[in-house]
Amino acid sequence: MSSTTTRRQANTYYVILIAGAAALGGFLFGFDTAVINGAVAALSKAFNASSVQTGLAVSLALLGSAVGAFYAGKIADRYGRVKAMVVASVLFTISAVGSGIAITIWDFIFWRVLGGLAVGAASVIAPAYIAECSPSHLRGRLGSLQQLAIVVGIFIALLSDYFIAVSAGSAELPFLFGIAAWRWMFWTEIPPAVLYGMAALTIPESPRYLVAQGREPEAANVLTKILGGNVLAKIEEIRQTVLRERQPKFSDLLSRSGRLLPIVWIGIGLSVFQQFVGINVIFYYSSILWRAVGFSEKNSLTITVITGAVNIITTLIAIAFVDKFGRKPLLILGSIGMTVTLGTMASIFGTAQVDAAGNPTLSTSAGIVALIAANLYVFCFGFSWGPVVWVLLGEMFNNKIRAAALSLAAAMQWVANFVVSTTFPPILQYFGLGTAYGLYTTAAAISIFFVWFFIRETKGIELEDM
């Protein structure tokens, strides 16, 4: 093996290592947003909360995420990507501790909103950092690490919820030291939150941030470890595309006419469609949803864990093919698959008989078809809109506007997530599951045309050429 090949492999391993450390933010992103799944019913009873208060406990954290995402770009551009990660780690830790010791529904909401700020920040910083530290031929796969980390975080949160609830007998019953099981569900986030901060302190700053700050010797050192070869030429490329004389501003996202640049609208569109297909209904409300159609608490949590595992497997498929097939084909295939599977669920739940409590009752065969359709839907989302949107948001904007544009697009993603998560319970109550899934089916169908007409392929293109 030649020395050149050995150096290239060493560079690749190093890039994977630092991208993995940054992607821990994605793990906490997924964990923090999903851990409430198994605790919703228990905390509602513990605080004697109304349905509105319970809904706010789930969804207000998402507005916190929107705020965190909106300001994360400014913080990352001013103080660096690494320092922003450390701040997010601290917020994750404080939120996990506070959520578990909450006394009322209102201070519980406060701690969840604090965690939401961290989630929003992580949703912006990790894909930007990974994109800025990845060679172009690896960027799609490394960018997909963010989504892989998110779905692994979701899976581990759901799995820990399951084991804690089963060990205690129910999320409402005492677990270790006589403390309610649902409180322990939130405390399980503390170790990975601390690990994230420790990992962030061991990775180098983004070379593109260092060049923007005029710290070119440091950037050269990092690029030598990442790319090798003629790093001075790479620094010159970066220098030509980054404004050194001032910090990027949100005004950079506006055209001369004062309107948002078309590329920013496309980024917002990607973010909104990723949420309007209803994926987070599965991860926030699935245990309640399956109990509503007749499954026990244990079986509902089991189904939810299986769904989380499916999400991980399909994300691995995306990582394997995103740099081979490209971004656009995967998005179109995913949109078609989601339209079919969501339409199937809309039809099954829309035609189901309703019991005295207003819950749909499914026959054995209909229940099996609904379960298969739900997991195929997660499969279609998992190899397409889940990871590919984060890859595109990390790479589609040029260096001048990346942090600001990614912040705005991610903030709108959380707003869309809030809208879907907040409207699902009343839609379910007043119109039924059939209508809810019918709306998500419509969004999936429209997304096909959005991708076809507005998304350009970015596979293999250098960030400096965007």
Image (spheres, rainbow, N blue to C red):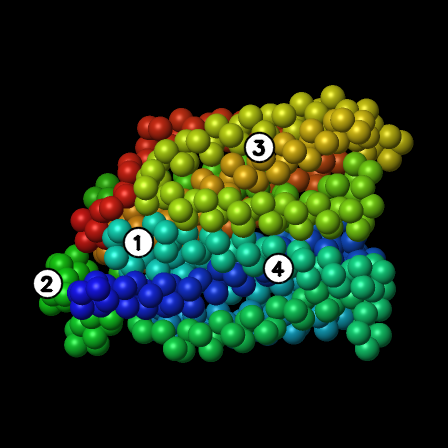
> Is the N terminus in the top left, top right, bottom left or bottom right quadrant?
bottom left
Q: Amino acid at mark 1?
A: Leu
Which residue: 43% across, 44% down?
318
Residue 226 vs residue 174: left or right? left
Front in this rendered view, residue 151 or 424: 151
The quadrant in which residue 429 appears is: top right
**Is 92 situated above or below 439?**
below
Label 3–label 2 contact, CB within 8 A: no
> How far apart, in angstroms, are the residues tagged by discs 3 and 4?
26 Å
Q: Secondary structure at mark 1?
A: loop
The quadrant in which residue 107 appears is: bottom right
First-in-chain label (2 vs 1): 1
Q: Nearer the viewer, mark 1 or mark 3?
A: 1
Q: Secondary structure at mark 4?
A: helix
The residue that mark 1 highlights is 138
Which residue: 51% across, 50% down?
414
Q: Nearer the viewer, mark 3 or mark 4?
A: 4
The residue that mark 2 highlights is 233
Q: Amino acid at mark 2?
A: Ala
Residue 57 vs residue 169: left or right? left
Q: Secondary structure at mark 2?
A: helix
Dot 3, crowdedness within 10 Å: few (<14), some or many (≥20)? many
The residue that mark 3 highlights is 440
The residue that mark 4 highlights is 156
Which residue: 65% across, 69% down?
188
